[in-house]
Image: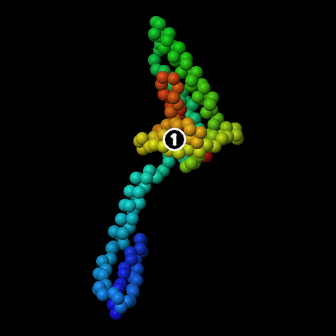
Amino acid sequence: MTQLTIWINVYLGNPKQISVTSPELTSPAPQHYPVPMAKTALHFLTISLAALLLTGCGGNFLVGKWTIDQERTVAELSPDGEPAQDAEGLLKAIGQGLQKGLAQILLSQFKGTVLEFTPTELRKTRDGVGTTVEYEILERPTTSSYIVKYADGEITTWQKVEGGIRMKFSGGQKDHWVYFTPVAE
């Protein structure tokens, strides 16, 4: 009768021994080469970190409550420089007026609104009334930007910026950004 001993390593624990006795076993018991605990823990952490980075589960910077940053949004929409006094300057002045109008439209759309992102939903509330829409992150072109698709089919780009986040608003010939800061709780 031969006895076969099997060693099983348990993550972050001691190896466990299982013994089986059988007359059919003819090979000798395998040698046990214990793996040091620190090495096992290092392997586990390395695999976990690699999985975290490769699956993109490093966190969603959108999650949280946000409100519009009016000053920064207006500053980014406002054209630089003074218009010239010729025909080209007149067209530039008209363009500047349209940009200011666009800024007011954007501000009125988001003024007093709190955006709350969960990992799967966007909740928009204003004066205690709001809506909820599910979303998914379609792409992560960079570590600080997401392309988001909402349940209604709308697709928007969000970026993490210093002091908050911003949303791309496509209007006319130029894309604009609407800036949001975290809501102080």
Q: Position of residue 81 (x, y in %)?
A: 45, 17
Q: Residue at (33%, 90%) from the top-left corner? A: 2
The residue identified by callout 1 is 148
Q: Residue at (48%, 28%) from the top-left corner? A: 175
Does the image show residue 68?
Answer: yes
Judge whether 162 appears above or below 10 on screen: above
Q: Residue at (49%, 37%) from the top-left corner? A: 157
Does the image show residue 75?
Answer: no
Judge whether 41 appears above or below 157 on screen: below
**Viewer-closest of 15 and 24:** 24
* Residue, far front: 24
Q: Which three-letter amino acid code belongs to the residue tagged 1?
A: Val
Judge whether 117 appears above or below 73 on screen: below
Neighbourhood count class around disc 1 (C-alpha, 10 Å): few under 14, some 14–19, many 20 upward: some
**Viewer-closest of 171 and 46:** 171
**Viewer-closest of 54 and 23:** 23
Where the N terminus falls, by quadrant? bottom left
Helix, strand, or loop for circle 1? strand
* Residue, far bottom: 1
Determine which quarter of the picture holds residue 5. bottom left
